[in-house]
Amino acid sequence: MEVNTCSIEIINQRDVVQKVYFRIPPVTHYLSTITKTRFLEDVNRDGSSEKLTGLLGQEKAFMDEMMHFLKLNALGIYFNLTYLS
């Protein structure tokens, strides 16, 4: 599989485990490590719906950050997103 492809396992309507593949958009490489870490530390993990609600609640902030760094990169301004804090 490609680097920009991932998979998850779900239980389908027939109660059978099924592997689902999906494409990871290249823009996700522009999300900083500090943002990822902060999200993982702060997201409510009480249940799967709470985790999903937390992710969807941060979607705009994630997209804003990724698009910002993508635009800077296109202008020749580079950041090491692993160490950005």
Image (cartoon, grey):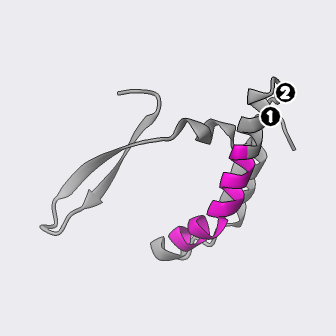
| Residue 57 in the image: above or below residue 8 | below
Which residue is most to the front? 75
| Labels 2 & 1 near each other (Cβ < 8 A) | yes
CA separation in Å, label 2 and label 1: 5 Å
- The reply to whether the magenta stretch includes residue 70 is no
Q: Measured from the top left, where is residue 30 in percent x and y? A: 68, 38
Identify the residue shown where x is 80% and y is 34%.
Answer: 72
Q: Quadrant of residue 12?
A: bottom left
Residue flagged by tag 2: what amino acid is it? Answer: Ile
Q: Determine which quarter of the picture holds residue 59.
A: bottom right
Residue type at numbered disc 1: Leu
- In the rendered image, residue 28, in percent from the top left (x then y), is placed at 60, 41
Res 77 label: 2
Residue carrying label 1:
72
In the picture, measured across the screen, residue 22 lies left or right of residue 39, that is left
Q: Which residues are magenta?
A: 51-67
Vertical comparison of 29 with 63: above or below = above
Quarter of the figure with the C terminus = top right
The 10 Å Cα crowd at callout 1, few under 14, some 14 to 19, many 20 or more, is few
- Helix, strand or loop at label 1? It is helix
Above or below: residue 24 compared with residue 42? above
Disc number placed over residue 3 in the picture, else none: none
The secondary element bearing badge 2 is classed as: loop
Tell me which secondary structure the magenta stretch mostly adopts: helix
Image coordinates of residue 81 in percent, x first then y, are: 77, 35
Q: Position of residue 47 (x, y in %)?
A: 49, 75
65 in magenta: yes
The answer to whether 63 appears left or right of 17 in the picture is right
